[in-house]
Amino acid sequence: MKTFASACVLAVAVALPAWSATVTNRDGEAAVLVVVEGESRMEVAISAGGTESICPSGCFITTPSGDRIGLQGDETIEIVKGSAVVK
């Protein structure tokens, strides 16, 4: 019975969708975002017109214009004139 319960929990965990924030750069040049997830800090470059998925578990981002935004991980964001527009 314990094995069956473990298998059910595993099946539900695998079936859950992986969420992440989607960022699209609407500017004419590449944009570099600073992404902080927990103790991890990295820079993510998004080419002009490009789209990237980030922050599957939530994070903070800093945009090229200096905006700092907290994300849950399910947002759609556009970079316009170096600033983030959350939709």
Image (cartoon, rainbow, N blue to C red):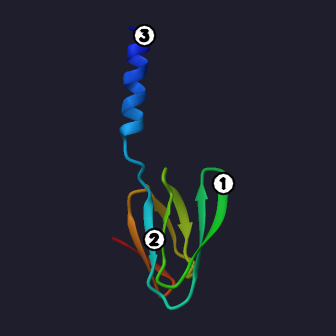
Q: Residue at x 60, y 50 (%)?
A: 38
Residue named by callout 2: 23
Q: Residue at x 59, y 64 (%)?
A: 35
Q: Position of residue 41 (x, y in %)?
A: 66, 60
Q: Residue furthest bottom?
A: 28
Residue named by callout 1: 40
- Density class for disc 3 (Cα within 10 Å; few <14, some 14-19, many ≥20) is few
Q: Secondary structure at mark 3?
A: helix
Q: Position of residue 75 (x, y in %)?
A: 38, 63
Is there CB contact under 8 Å for labels 1 and 2? no
Q: Residue at x 57, y 78 (%)?
A: 66
* Disc nearest the viewer among 3 and 2: 3
Compared with 78, 28 (above or below) is below
Is there CB contact under 8 Å for labels 3 and 1? no
Compared with 73, 34 (above or below) is below
Compared with 20, 43 (above or below) is below
Q: Nearer the viewer, residue 11 or 52?
A: 11
